[in-house]
Image (spheres, rainbow, N blue to C red):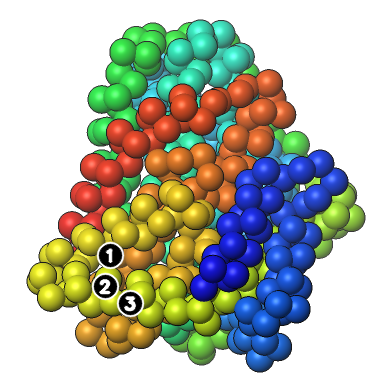
Amino acid sequence: MILALGLFLVTLLFVIWQPKGLQIGTTTLIGAVLALLLGVVNFNDVLTVTGIVWDATLAFIGIIILSMVLDEIGFFEWTAIKMAKLSGGSGNKMFIYILLLGAVVSAFFANDGAALILTPILLAKMKYLKMKPLPIFAFLMAGGFIGDSASNPLVISNLTNILTADYFHIGFIEYAKNMFLPNLLAITASIVVLWVYFRKDIPLRVDVSLLPEASTVIKNKTMFRLSWFFLAFLMAGYFIGDYYHLPISLFALGGAFIFLLIASYYKAVKPVKIVKEAPWQIVWFSIGLYIVVYGLKNAGLTHEVASWIEYLQTQGETVAVIGTGFLSAVMSSIANNLPTIMIMDIAIDHVGYVGNEALVYANILGSNLGPKMTPIGSLATLLWLHVLAQKGVKIGWGEYMKVGLVITPPVLLVALLGLL
């Protein structure tokens, strides 16, 4: 256990630190190789982990590629300007509309897509509107929070969702039905809590006339019009795939490449550039990290966590659901949500999936919302901070946690109540 835990912590440290020249995928692969050489895992474990994560990882890459193409077209910038102008210059309305936009982007293009693409657009528009530092901080923190807190409604909304759905063989429709109310509550609670927390920093009036016309940011009108139809067909594909029990990556990654080819035909993007910039490191990151985490399972950690969940069950359904959600949240905030989701999935599987379905969804909610308590809680938050740093905006750990520790628990509690 000490060896497996030590290897996991060192690997996680390098993932968070991200020393120059060492990408996150390379880091976790080194950790995986060490786990294999030290006997923490064996080759059969490697095959098992690869079988668990391949679909989720490829689907995630597909969603990001699709997002990158839409971003090149001007799709997200157009929606951001539309939402801003819809506010009519009211700062409070703009705050709420931006949160709703973040929720929609996170739902269909994953929380990481929202962090990578929507964040720089919002920052640029806020500077365009000549906002002061405090309002900019409020909008950015709120946008970053909603990206994770609203990443629950669909299997494709978060890598954790895909991994869990694959692990427990949960269908696209079944997942969406069970998560509809919790996600609706999560979005509502997020908007209320964020507005209450930042209400003094939100400007009463914003001069939206400073923004350009939305139509002027569209870089290829043919592709822009086609994108709406394509997204509708892609969503239909997810439902068809669910009916025939097909891998979600078949539609997410396959659809992304088809869309990329169409965009290339209309000269809207440079396909080689898109493919080259796609986050392929996430493949090695997922496989490597989960191999290291599987070493913790072999050392008995998941059995220990399963015993905690069994104790919560003896206290009644309400305590079990809320307790499981907060257990997952605390673990995610300390040790990142990607290893947490796997540890908790395996632990819940030990307890038994049938009859405990609510615990699976509580785990997802905890793993999606809980990471917002700390900067290291999720890959999306790390990406979000990295994007902001590249734009010259640095948010310290203390500054971040001062907000995250206050607003996360009430939102998570409200969302978990939706499972009861």
Which amino acid, mark 3?
A: Ala
| Rendering coords of residue 256 (x, y %) | 70, 63
Image: 1 above or below 331: below
Q: What mark, if any, has residue 134 been given in the picture? A: none
Local SS, label 3: helix
Give yes or no for contact between labels 2 and 1 (Cβ–Cβ under 8 Å).
yes
Which residue is tagged 3? 306
How many labels, in total?
3
Give yes or no for contact between labels 1 and 3 (Cβ–Cβ under 8 Å).
no
Q: What mark, if any, has residue 324 been given in the picture? A: 1
* Residue situated furthest left in the rendering: 316
Give the alpha-carbon distance from disc 1 to disc 3, as whole Å: 10 Å
Which amino acid, mark 2?
A: Ile
Q: What mark, if any, has residue 309 been given in the picture? A: 2
Give the alpha-carbon distance from disc 3 to disc 2, as whole Å: 5 Å
Q: Residues within 10 Å of mark 3 (few under 14, many from 20)?
A: many
Which amino acid, mark 1?
A: Thr
Quadrant of the frame with the C terminus: bottom left
Look at 60% across and 35% down and name the residue there.
385
Instruction: Give the mark nearer the N terminus: 2 vs 1.
Output: 2
Q: Residues within 10 Å of mark 2 (few under 14, many from 20)?
A: many
Give yes or no for contact between labels 3 and 2 (Cβ–Cβ under 8 Å).
yes
